[in-house]
């Protein structure tokens, strides 16, 4: 949060913008100096894009068409395998569509044709030439700075650099026309941007010529040229679509410099300090040098990043001259909040996200962006998050070996949870293709909140509250638990940073030694264990934090003790398979929070019971049901009716056939669900894959057999298809013959004449029995 400095002396050069006090210097750009930058751009990049389009024209039928109402741009599935492309959420009705055109990688085209074309060769030579001011050791240190303050960095990038940057009215006019910030696609759009950052900072080889970050930067440069070319082409036909005179050239040099600035200078001098983190001067120099080189690769002017003083002056100039929120700014800023709320891995509520955005941007800018005002409770949670960041970052930064360990862990965690996890990019890295194509009808509108993912294991708000309480206890003069480096290392290893805020999570770690009898009751250890055994068991489970240490040489158990122990284990396994035991696991075993509050010992104590509970695999809907109960409580929990995929498909078919007759209200009343659920079903474009379709057809087969078998019992003749499958067959049995299968004159007999029973081949068994050749199969086997 920005706090005013009561001791600052104002001069004639003092300016204030959105809570930031600026002292103008000769290094600050004037409006006369920034005006030409709004009309200049990367000409070489656009010329090379034109040549690449001539060499390999983009397939016209592959261009996505976004929804102008919600700006829910369809993803171009050329990045995915054909089988994944069949699962697209697009408008195609038939999921088994033929394979689309081959993937077009502009970077690969540039690389393969650089020696054949003069312009392509010029660009290829430029990006492969390392500027004289690049020091690879300094670049490496700059990469470490990002991961040293990684969680706070992602929080600042999401809520200040991106969300706060939506206050730049000129820039959002371009973003809104791409449709890439509708609520349905904005989250993936954020992850793709984070992918570029991770590829540029993960390893030094990744940013050097030929590395993955280096190649992604060139792809981003060509993507910017494609967006610029598309918008200008549309503006030529319809001047009212985009005003170059008013907004400047799309993605101009000033916009490119602003992008590099919000990724570097805004973090150093705004986002990190407002979270309580102040970097060293050398760290600031190294981090600015890293982003100066990235800016060079993406075609941005780099002179303003030659020194930290110039970089800070540029950041302040942009804050002063460019941040003027418009109505479009409000829409995009709120879309970012709506696409991230209640989403993994942080599962932060909308109030928590808004509190984070206001904490970093200030209330003045938050009001201008149309963000609601959160309660004091969420302000307190943000304070707890800042306490967590300060403790972790300053502690590890103080010891070099710990710092190296933390940076290595954070690199792996970021890549795993943002790129490889199912709630991130799911392992499908983007090639920064032209997915969000500007069209006349596209203008991003305020989207709807995305459905929450309910299989959450933790919530970031609980962590923030816990750290706020820790800080309060420390300020009051007491520390609840001795601090140890090993405990903090385990804590940081569980830190998870995500593209939707960089929130972290950690395990419960209390260490009080409570009453052994109470622990035995909580752990269900009353049976079969003595007081001494309980104390020894607690010592093992709590790593020495509770109980008594067992002797080094354990006395070998007697045969009677081992037999009693095995008997007890069999009883527990038998109870585990019954319904009573499953209910006992969910109700009898105390929750982690209850254990910590009650006894003050770590949740690892309940490992054995929780392990048995976790071993039972539940259906996804049961997991979601349990999560809803935990989230809303017993009073607020209202279970909804679960519709099968077949029922939802039928709802879509009925509504499509006669929309007026089968309206939303009629379908909601018939299927006994809410109208909002019907609307979501009608909007959904989900199509089953081959495996799901096969299971679905099997369900239909079983359902058809059951239905027509019931008709057979009533005397109705089933269709030929089901008769061929054996429905209504009575051969080999003594069942009543259906009326449709009886011959004339037989109706009324009621039953078919019984056949002569088969001879009984079984004989008495015993020593010396002669079974002969006519013995039954059982006799022959015996």
Image (cartoon, rainbow, N blue to C red):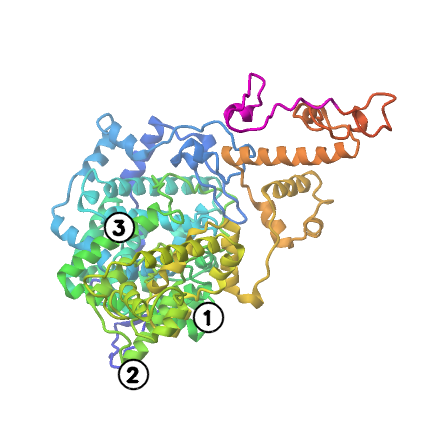
Which element carries disc 3, helix, strand or loop? helix
**Residue at 17% in and 60% down:** 402
Q: Quadrant of residue 142?
A: bottom left
Residue 153, image x, y percentages: 28, 59
Most extreme residue toward the top is 773
Q: Is residue 468 left or right of residue 408?
A: right
The numbered mark, 1 or 2, whose residue comes first in the sequence reads 1
Q: 733 or 432: which is nearer to us? A: 733
Which element carries disc 1, helix, strand or loop? loop
The numbered mark, 2 or 3, whose residue comes first in the sequence reads 3
C-alpha span from label 1 to label 2: 30 Å
Q: Which residue is mark 3?
A: 412
Crowdedness near tag 2: few (<14), some (14–19) or many (≥20) residues, C-alpha within 10 Å: few
Residue 540, image x, y percentages: 27, 63
Which element carries disc 2, helix, strand or loop? helix
Q: Can residue 364 be seen in this snapshot?
A: no
C-alpha span from label 3 to label 1: 36 Å
Q: 453 or 450: which is nearer to us? A: 453
**Residue at 29% in and 71% down:** 511
Q: 100 or 32: which is nearer to us? A: 100
Using the image, determine if residue 1 lies above or below residue 206: below
Q: Which residue is mark 1?
A: 373
Q: Which residue is mark 2?
A: 476
Q: Is residue 667 left or right of residue 308?
A: right
Q: Quadrant of residue 265?
A: bottom left
**Residue at 36% in and 41% down:** 428
Q: Which residues are magenta?
A: 755-782
Crowdedness near tag 1: few (<14), some (14–19) or many (≥20) residues, C-alpha within 10 Å: some
The numbered mark, 3 or 1, whose residue comes first in the sequence reads 1
């Amino acid at each position: 949060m920005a706090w005013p400095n009561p001791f600052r002396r104002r001069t004639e050069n003092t300016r204030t913008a959105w809570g930031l006090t600026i002292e103008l210097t000769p290094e600050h750009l004037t409006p006369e100096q920034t005006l030409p930058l709004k009309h200049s751009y990367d000409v070489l990049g656009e010329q090379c894009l034109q040549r690449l389009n001539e060499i390999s024209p983009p397939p016209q039928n592959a261009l996505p068409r976004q929804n102008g109402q919600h700006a829910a741009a369809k993803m171009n599935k050329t990045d995915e395998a054909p089988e994944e492309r069949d699962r697209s959420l697009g408008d195609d009705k038939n999921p088994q569509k033929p394979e689309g055109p081959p993937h077009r990688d502009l970077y690969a085209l540039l690389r393969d044709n650089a020696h054949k074309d003069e312009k392509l060769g010029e660009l290829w030579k430029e990006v492969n030439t390392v500027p004289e001011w690049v020091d690879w050791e300094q670049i490496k240190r700059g990469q470490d700075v990002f991961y040293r303050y990684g969680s706070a960095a992602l929080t600042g990038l999401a809520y200040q650099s991106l969300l706060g940057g939506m206050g730049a009215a000129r820039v959002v006019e371009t973003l809104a026309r791409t449709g890439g910030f509708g609520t349905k696609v904005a989250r993936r759009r954020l992850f793709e941007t984070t992918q570029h950052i991770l590829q540029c900072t993960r390893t030094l080889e990744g940013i050097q010529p030929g590395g993955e970050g280096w190649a992604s930067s060139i792809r981003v440069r060509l993507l910017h040229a494609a967006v610029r070319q598309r918008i200008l082409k549309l503006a030529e036909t319809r001047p009212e679509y985009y005003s170059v005179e008013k907004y400047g050239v799309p993605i101009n040099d000033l916009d490119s410099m602003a992008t590099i600035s919000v990724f570097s200078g805004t973090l150093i001098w705004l986002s990190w300090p407002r979270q309580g983190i102040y970097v060293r001067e050398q760290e600031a120099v190294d981090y600015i040098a890293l982003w100066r080189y990235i800016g060079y690769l993406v075609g941005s002017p780099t002179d303003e990043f030659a020194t930290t003083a110039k970089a800070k002056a540029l950041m302040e100039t942009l804050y002063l001259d460019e941040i003027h929120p418009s109505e479009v700014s409000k829409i995009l800023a709120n879309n970012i909040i709506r696409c991230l709320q209640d989403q993994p891995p942080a599962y932060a509520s909308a109030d928590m996200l808004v509190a984070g955005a206001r904490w970093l941007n200030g209330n003045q800018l938050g009001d201008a962006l149309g963000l609601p005002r959160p309660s004091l409770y969420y302000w307190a949670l943000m304070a707890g998050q800042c306490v967590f960041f300060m403790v972790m970052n300053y502690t590890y930064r103080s010891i070099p070996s710990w710092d190296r360990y933390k940076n290595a862990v954070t690199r792996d965690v970021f890549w795993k949870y943002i790129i490889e996890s199912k709630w991130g990019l799911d392992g499908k890295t983007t090639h920064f293709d032209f997915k969000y194509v500007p069209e006349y009808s596209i203008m991003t509108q305020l989207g709807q909140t995305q459905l929450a993912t309910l299989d959450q294991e933790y919530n970031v708000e609980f962590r923030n509250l816990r750290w706020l309480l820790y800080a309060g206890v420390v300020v009051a003069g007491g520390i609840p638990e001795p601090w140890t480096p090993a405990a903090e290392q385990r804590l940081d290893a569980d830190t998870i940073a995500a593209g939707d805020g960089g929130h972290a999570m950690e395990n419960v770690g209390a260490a009080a030694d409570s009453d052994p009898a109470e622990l035995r009751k909580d752990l269900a250890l009353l049976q079969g264990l003595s007081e001494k055994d309980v104390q020894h068991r607690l010592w093992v489970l709590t790593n020495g934090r509770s109980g008594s240490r067992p002797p080094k040489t354990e006395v070998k158990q007697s045969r009677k003790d081992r037999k009693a122990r095995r008997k007890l284990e069999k009883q527990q396994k038998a109870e585990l398979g019954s319904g009573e035991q499953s209910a006992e696991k969910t109700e009898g075993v105390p929750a982690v929070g209850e254990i910590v509050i009650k006894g003050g010992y770590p949740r690892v104590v309940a490992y054995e019971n929780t392990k048995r509970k976790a071993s039972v695999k539940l259906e996804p809907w049961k997991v979601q049901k349990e999560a809803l109960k935990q989230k809303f409580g017993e009073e607020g929990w209202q279970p909804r009716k679960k519709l099968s995929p077949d029922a939802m498909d039928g709802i879509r078919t009925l509504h499509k056939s006669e929309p007026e007759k089968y309206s939303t209200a009629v379908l909601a009343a018939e299927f006994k669900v809410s109208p909002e659920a019907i609307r979501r079903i009608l909007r959904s474009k989900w199509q089953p894959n081959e495996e799901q379709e096969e299971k679905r057809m099997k369900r239909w087969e079983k359902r058809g057999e059951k239905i027509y078998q019931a008709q057979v019992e009533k005397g109705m003749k089933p269709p030929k298809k089901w008769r061929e499958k054996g429905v209504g067959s009575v051969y080999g049995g003594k069942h009543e013959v259906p009326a449709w299968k009886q011959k004339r004159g037989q109706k009324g007999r009621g039953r078919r004449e019984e056949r002569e029973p088969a001879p009984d081949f079984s004989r008495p068994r015993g020593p010396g029995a002669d079974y002969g050749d006519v013995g039954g199969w059982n006799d022959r086997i015996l």
